[in-house]
Image: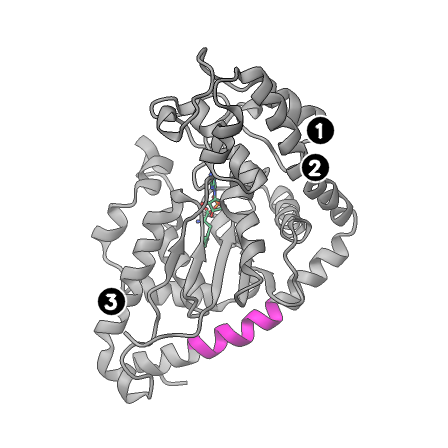
Amino acid sequence: MPTFPERVFSGVQPTGSLHLGNYLGAIKRFVALQETHDCIYCVVDLHAITVQQSPVELRSNIREVTAAFIAAGIDPKKHIVFNQSQVAEHAELAWVFNCVARMGWLNRMTQFKDKAGKNSENVSVGLFAYPTLMAADILVYRATHVPVGEDQKQHLELSRDVAQKFNNDFAESIASNGFGEAFFPLPEPLIQGPATRVMSLRDGSKKMSKSDVSDYSRLNLSDDRDAIAQKIRKAKTDPEPLPSEVAGLAGRLEADNLVGIFAALTGESRADVLKRFGGQNFSAFKSALADAAVAGLEPVGSEMKRLLADPGHLEAVLNDGADRARVLAAKTMGSVKDILGFVR
Ligand code: TYM
């Protein structure tokens, strides 16, 4: 496999209130990667419509994710921030990938099974093909690194399989068009840190999610100081004091989750946190956790509010990002057409 220039791509769906899981598992890490990589961060509105959306809410959610990116510290001038539907090549390459990916691969996707549930005959074709659009998002920029939370791991594996199969199926044409041994890199998932899977505050066996009916299950980026403190006070725990070592968290889902959240917010390891709080009961720990959560989230939330007051500015950021993304995407798509044998 040849080496490709390193480039980071990731996306967030504009489908509802952004929460601590999105922030710690993804957005906070997007910010850090700006120091070392060229980054492209996308508001994936085409993915959002795989389930029905209200147009009014969708527009407002696209602005909200854009505001969250910028408020968290993503620099849209040095890097690229845009919304997916403005760069038509995502959908175009996704079609090509629908013809590369196999039914069997998509049939194995656990997220589709979870989302479709017993209703699989009645969900959209788009929901089934969701992962090939994800592969197109990444590969239309020939991106090499993809920061995501744990729940996206299987989708990333599928992106690698699609890239690999395209490279194999068209190996001769790739070489004869001057691209050497492989056209697409095999994108690497970056699933790192203490908060790759933030769990519900009400149930340590369930992922923190936008779609949970209980708002007490998650900390939203838009929550104010009082809401954050109250949700942490009410978070489920067990009756034992905190252990002094990480091994002692085994089987204690809620304790493990809260310690992981604390570690991710303060930039420590779980072991460091337990050195400090081991042997103490949850009330002391929860009050320190509430302080850390307020310190971590409130500045982002209030900056988001400020940015959301000027939708014109946010739209200008997206338009500028889309103009720059389109240039890169069009180049890849042109090459893909040559490799496939399309006339252009
Ligand atoms: P989405 O919008 O569901 O979530 C955005 C990011 O947040 C992460 N995440 C979490 N991390 C830790 N704990 C949690 N409880 C938690 N919940 C969500 C997700 O892993 C994700 O990184 N399919 C993607 C969006 C997408 C994408 C892409 C990502 C579309 N195209 C290309 C990477 C590359 C999604 O639905 O993310």
| Segment tinted magenta in the rendering | 322-333
Q: Main secondary structure of the magenta part?
A: helix
**Is-magenta flag for residue 324?**
yes
Observer-nearest of 96 and 238: 238
Q: Residue at x 54, y 33 (%)?
A: 262
Q: Quadrant of the N terminus?
A: bottom left
Is residue 166 among what the camera can see? yes
Q: CA distance from mark 2 to mark 1?
A: 7 Å
Q: Residue at x 51, y 24 (%)?
A: 201
Q: Quadrant of the C terminus?
A: bottom left
Q: Residues at badges 2 and 1 in contact (C-beta under 8 Å)?
A: yes
Q: Mark 1 highlights which residue?
A: 225
Amino acid type, residue under disc 2 in the picture: Glu
Q: Mark 3 highlights which residue?
A: 165
Q: Quadrant of residue 319?
A: bottom right
Q: Is residue 197 above or below residue 340?
A: above
Q: Secondary structure at mark 1?
A: helix
Residue 20, given in percent of the width and then of the height, sits at: 56, 37
Mark 1 Cα shell of 10 Å, populated few (<14), some (14-19), many (≥20): some
Q: Residue at x 57, y 22 (%)?
A: 285
Observer-nearest of 15 and 3: 3
Ranked by sequence position, the earlier of labels 1 and 3 is: 3
